[in-house]
Image: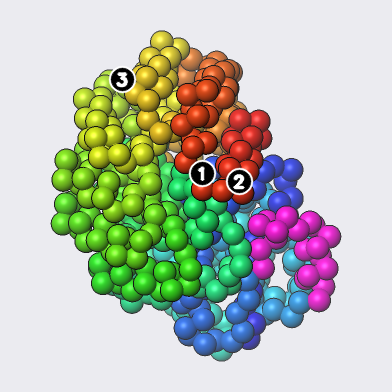
Amino acid sequence: MKITFLVPPVLDGQRPAERSAGCTRVVYFAPNIYELTVIGVVENEKLGEVAYEDFVFYKRSEDDYRKFLTGDDSDIYCIWAVNLSIESDLKAIGILQSLRPQSRIILMGPGPSYFIEKCLVNDRIVIVRGEPEATIVELLHALDENKPLDGILGISWLDGDGKVVNNGFRPLIGDLDALPFPARHFIAGRQYHNPKIKRSGYTTAFTSRNCPYRCIYCVPSSLTFAREIENKRFTGRKPTISYRTAASVDREMAMLHEQGYKAVGFMDDNFIWNEERTRLMCEIMKKYEMLWGCQARVDAITEPIAKMLGESGCCYVDLGVESFNDEILKYVRKGITTEQIYESIRLLKKYNVPVKLNVLIGSSPLETKETLRHTLKEAKKLNVDQVMFNIVSPFPGTEFYKLCKENNWLSTPDYVPTDVQRESILNLPNISSKEMEQILFKNNISYFLSWGFVSKQIKRFSSWNEFAHAARALKIKLFG
């Protein structure tokens, strides 16, 4: 049996969807660490030949895709899909099935986990919902041995009458250490660049899955979002948090160091949990002389943690602040205050840890032009390393989506994919989609093209090549 993991070409006229973060379009490429972990699991099962074909990274066209399929002999094609990629992926699936009608297609990720009926266009497709690793192994065994699918937990498929069958809920993986490391050998030779780290030899990794907090708008990493969609569907609750041990992370970093990697961006929804775990992680990164960065909550930053980060090569901490209005923060259940935002930034700057703030426009009906301008002013006044401004998107599967539907805040009949870096489909009570878009665009121009921002960034690049990649990412960020 031959199994090919596909990243199909973009066929909807949009910029490619970012499939690991899941909620934006690509500004700079990063490895889809979740898909590569699934590939590693499938390889370990030795079910047959495994291949990986990425038409987006190499900017290969629809014609290239058709030529590939015409000459290919895979039995099964696997696609990791997110909300922003579904329309394009369905077109690619149509082409695939016209050229390879006997092949089976397995869809994974948050897109098909939520939009089940939309994705099950015929009985050659099977959806692996939620956390995919254990499910896909059982499914591949069944397909290889031509066994019935009705006993496999965590999948959706069409029966002989064309009816959707949603098999039961599969429990989450209890031991993340049992998973193989991501199959990075399939992307060997690629150069990824993270403008926040500014050192080549970059990859991504994860040390935990999920976040316990209940922000109403949140679309975390694509894997976490798939887990949340599935867990809430069957239990009504968020999934439990899963952790890797420090020993497992140490083994992976040792391997990456041996392979020549020099920088790691951790994709955990929340990397910093407590001082002891943070100390262990910082010691590992310092041991292998890795530059690195992570995402964290402002209320997790204590002085000892800030000091550990500063001494361990941490090149950025992504802080989701969203707003500098306490009433808005309370409404969206962020669980933080503006006072905590200011204090976390003070501590990180004290120990020379670069800070990136994430600001989310329109996350609450309390948003007005005045609250928005205040937030943007405060974010820029803090003089942090970088501020990223996005407009909230009411992703199906979030509480915010339900609120938007119930209160008629959508400017479209229902959710449509938007580029959160420049587009809005929300007309909130006190601010319209057009007003949010205009304020965002003007703010981005004034911020990212200011001499203060440019001069701060340019001195940190280690090479002209890294600067060129960052400049291209900024161009895409501002103008598409």
Instruction: Look at discs 3 and 2 and give the one toward the viewer.
Output: 2
Mark positioned earlier in the residue sequence (1 or 3): 3
Instruction: Give the residue drawn at x 37%, y 25%.
Output: 383
Q: How many marks?
A: 3
Q: Residue 298, how many percent across, how many down?
A: 26, 37
Numbered label attached to residue 333: none
| Quarter location, residue 253 | bottom left
| Quarter location, residue 257 | bottom left
Query: Label 3's element?
Result: loop
Residue to which mark 3 is pinned: 325
Marks 3 and 2, how far apart in space? Answer: 40 Å
Identity, as a three-letter code, of the amino acid under mark 2: Trp
Q: Give the class, few, some or many, for how many residues have Cα within 10 Å of label 3's Cα (few <14, many ≥20).
A: some
Marks 1 and 3, how far apart in space? Answer: 34 Å
Res 265 seen here: yes
Residue 177 versus residue 31 in the image, above or below: below
Residue to which mark 2 is pinned: 464
Instruction: Give the residue drawn at x 43%, y 14%.
Output: 373
Identity, as a three-letter code, of the amino acid under mark 3: Asn
Residue 259 versus residue 366 in the image, above or below: below
Query: Label 2's element?
Result: helix
Instruction: Tell me whether circle 1 and circle 2 mark residues in contact (CB < 8 Å).
Output: yes
Q: Give the class, few, some or many, for how many residues have Cα within 10 Å of label 2's Cα (few <14, many ≥20).
A: few
The magenta segment is 53-71
Numbered label attached to residue 461: 1
Identity, as a three-letter code, of the amino acid under mark 1: Phe
